[in-house]
Image (spheres, rainbow, N blue to C red):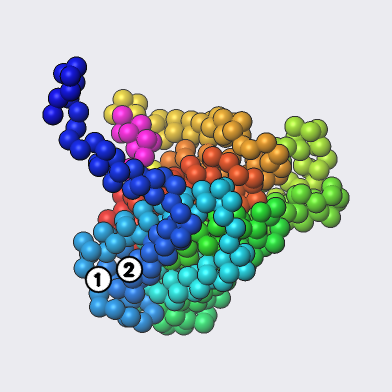
Amino acid sequence: MTTDNNQWTPPFPTQLRAVVSPVLAAVAQPRPGTAVAMSAAGVTLFALVGAGAPNHNTLTVPITWRALPAMPDPLSQTVVIAAVVLSCLGTLGMLGARRRGWSPDSRLLFRSGALAVLVVANLTPVGSSDTASYAAYGRIAALGGDPYLTSPAELGGPYARLVALAWHDTPSVYGPVATWWQTAAAFLGGERPWLTIWVLMLANALVFLATGLLLMRTADDPVRAGLLWVANPLLIGVLVAGGHLDTLVAALAVAAILVARRTPRLRNDLLMGGLVGLACCVKISAALLGVALAWPLLRAGAWRRVARQATAAVLTVALLYSVYGLHALDPLSAASRMISSPSLWTVFDRLGSALLGPDATATAIRLLWPALMLALAWVLHRRTPTGSPPAVAVPFVLAFAWVLTAPWSMPWYAALAWAPAALCPQGRLTRYLVVTTAALALVHNSGGHGWTA
């Protein structure tokens, strides 16, 4: 079809626009009901994959009971991708609806999230084999062994058979608090690894819900806090369905941030430092939290408060690690050289290894990525909403920058950024965090199969 000025126009433009425009609007700014439906669908799909274990996206055997026939691997991969995409769109849609004035009942929001959490916590872990490693380390400790010297391969038996091959020969890289957490579950599970992992899943779910309740009770906007944590389908799929220890780190981070916002007192500084130390004794990456909470105080010249907090944190870490000895830190050295794929650092590593050699390249990466993280954190901090308390904004941007720049980054690591994000005012960075978590979840969701280390 042509016009008088000889410019081509598509056929039926008015009718086509009438059909396409509502669809685009529904995706860009979905109604609250549509966003909730997408979120519910995302969680349901995560649950279906867990109920259909074993498959490519779960552990090699069902951990609790087989609710459905085993899902074929190609189907499970497709379902997980759909679950991540729907959860991402649902989360973005609910947050957008909240910005436009949607105000669901906060109690109903918590109950709905709690129901979803309890459902996925009672199924086989999805997206990672980390829970199998947790169970193996706990079993080693429960039998009187040292998980920082003994690998799952040396343990052998039914526990070791569940651990991903990439981690068979790796002693624990987690802190003593994590080891005691794992040991308690292994004492209950005994010779039944499925029971140990089930206990870990349930305990993780309870911590997740307790963190959500704390966030909703202390945030200026309880509804937004609920949407970002307890009713967040993306976090339910990544943290709860995956059963990751990062939930416990996030819980301790929230507690430390809330203490940091109290009136400056000696006991508050010591308590906050102790909480940071406990978090570091779950995963050493929680040291970022201590740096983030200290930074605003250093800028304000509150050196004495920083010294008290740092002393409490270091003493806590030293005391708890002394139960095992300095060798408990050895596995962390090997883990620090790991690079996840796909990653920009993978390209740098390959090119650098060819030009400079592996050792020089590894050293360069260890020096470059922290500098890049700090630079990105500074850029992100300039874009945080006005009025964000420093004790909330700095931990958020530093954790987010870490997730974006670290050579080894997994979607569940974002929990350390999600927790303070729930206490921040509305801002665009939250949407970027949603997309980043979803993107990482799309490439790291194999249940321990086919990982590139």
Judged from the image, the secondary structure of the residue bearing numbered disc 2 is helix
Residue found at the very far front of the displayed protein: 4
Splitting the image into 4 quarters, where does residue 163 fall? bottom left
User: In terms of image quadrants, where is residue 3?
Assistant: top left
Q: Which mark is residue 364?
A: none
Image coordinates for residue 168, horizontal then vertical, percent? 36, 62
Q: Earlier in the sequence, mark 1 or mark 2?
A: 2
Query: Picture coordinates of residue 274 (x, y %)?
Result: 72, 56
Residue ID at (65%, 51%): 423
Is 425 in front, or is 13? 13
Q: Which residue is mark 2?
A: 49
The residue depicted at 56 percent of the width and 48 percent of the height is: 100
Q: Amino acid at mark 2?
A: Val
Q: Which mark is residue 71?
A: 1
**Quick check: 260 above or below 361?**
below
Q: Indicate the position of residue 420 as horizontal and vertical percent values.
A: 62, 50
Instruction: Give the amino acid at mark 1.
Output: Met
* Residue 40 vertical placement versus 392 (above, below): below
Kindly identify the residue that appears in the image at 36 percent across and 40 percent down.
343
- Which stretch appears magenta? 340-351
Are circles 1 and 2 on residues that touch, CB within 8 Å? yes
